[in-house]
Image (tube, rainbow, N blue to C red):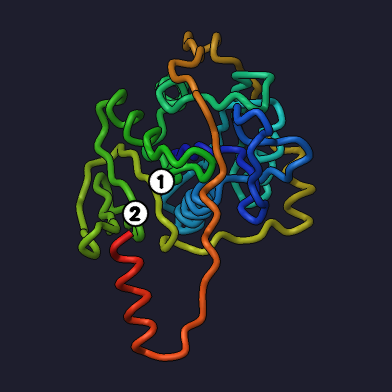
């Protein structure tokens, strides 16, 4: 069984995000970029399935700018077998929308015929949480979202997923699309020898035109603003004063 793992290049989660002065978007100049943390988890899970003998090949895919090859090399260094880079734009500030990404992934799935697609539940830059679900709909496959545990058994996958009320365990038919959550696993670090080996692993470079997909934006960002600054706190001398202050805040 092949496992397909889409990965996205995003601002590193340790970096303080800053909005452009004109409010047109997030400033990416001289900013450290990394693999989306949820995608790291999906790559790790795919590698574990291979190590357990339940998968034969792990294919990492990225749709975006040419610099995404660095993200794919990270996936290859972790243990993926090969990669496919779809260069969809030259502008690092242009985010390829989930529907366009899902259409490209569908074309790749049609070519590669994987038994499982493992996606991060969402990207930490736009938090849309949509690509996996859209791919499932386009393919007509089953889907399991927010997975915190995945077990493959024959033509079935048992997935424990995180829901508002706790945990829900479902069984879906293979092939399937699974989007993973934080508690599924702890991604491994790529060792230096594996980083060197990753440079020799195959990476195909494609364009959306190769798959007949139009990635022109359908959405327009009208403005981007920083979160509201948190108001300064105050000290109170007694419980009575605290209660009085809380009552004042409650009436604002």
Asked if 98 appears above or below 56 in the picture, the reply is above
Q: Position of residue 93 (x, y in %)?
A: 64, 27
Q: Nearer the viewer, residue 123 or 213?
A: 123
Please indicate whether residue 60 sits to the left or right of residue 155 in the image. right
Q: Residues within 10 Å of mark 2 (few under 14, many from 20)?
A: many
**Quarter of the N terminus within the rendering:** top left
Badge nearest the viewer, 2 or 1: 1
> SS for tag 2?
strand
User: Is residue 197 visible in this depiction of the protein?
Assistant: yes
> Which numbered disc flags the more N-terminal residue, 2 or 1?
1
Query: Taking 179 as reference, is 135 above or below it?
Result: above
Q: Is residue 202 above or below residue 87?
A: below
**Residue 48 image point, x, y percent:** 49, 57
Judge by depth and name the residue closer to the eye, 198 or 119: 119
Q: Is residue 41 above or below residue 214?
A: below
- 219 or 19: which is nearer to us? 19
Q: Are marks 2 and 1 in contact (CB under 8 Å)?
A: yes
Q: Could you tell me which residue is drawn at 34 percent across and 88 percent down?
A: 240
Cα distance in 3D space between marks 2 and 1: 8 Å
Image-quadrant location for residue 149: bottom left
Q: Position of residue 141 (x, y in %)?
A: 26, 32
Identified at 48% across, 44% down, the residue is 56
Give the image quarter of residue 107: top left
Q: Which residue is mark 2?
A: 147
Q: Secondary structure at mark 1?
A: loop
Query: Is the C terminus in the top left, top right, bottom left or bottom right quadrant?
Result: bottom left
Residue tagged by mark 1? 121
């Amino acid at each position: 069984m092949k496992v397909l793992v889409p990965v996205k290049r995003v601002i590193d989660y340790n970096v303080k995000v800053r909005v452009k002065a004109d409010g047109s978007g997030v400033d990416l100049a001289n900013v450290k970029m990394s693999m989306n943390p949820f995608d790291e988890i999906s790559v790790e899970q795919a590698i574990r399935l291979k190590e357990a003998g339940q998968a034969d090949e792990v294919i990492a895919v990225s749709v975006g700018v040419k610099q995404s090859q660095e993200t794919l090399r990270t996936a290859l260094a972790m243990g993926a077998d090969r990669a496919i880079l779809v260069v969809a734009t030259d502008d690092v500030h242009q985010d390829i929308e989930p529907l366009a990404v899902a259409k490209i992934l569908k074309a790749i799935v049609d070519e590669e015929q994987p038994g499982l697609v493992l996606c991060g539940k969402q990207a930490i830059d736009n938090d849309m949480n949509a690509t996996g679900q859209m791919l499932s709909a386009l393919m007509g496959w089953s889907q399991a979202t927010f997975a915190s545990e995945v077990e493959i058994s024959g033509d079935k996958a048992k997935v424990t997923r995180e829901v508002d009320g706790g945990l829900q365990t479902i069984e879906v038919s293979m092939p399937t699309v699974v989007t993973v959550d934080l508690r599924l696993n702890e991604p491994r670090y790529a060792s230096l020898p594996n980083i060197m080996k990753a440079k020799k692993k195959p990476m195909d470079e494609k364009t959306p035109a190769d798959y007949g997909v139009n990635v022109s934006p359908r959405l327009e960002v009208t403005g981007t603003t920083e979160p509201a600054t948190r108001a300064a706190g105050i000290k109170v001398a007694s419980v009575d004063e605290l209660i009085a202050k809380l009552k004042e805040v409650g009436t604002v």
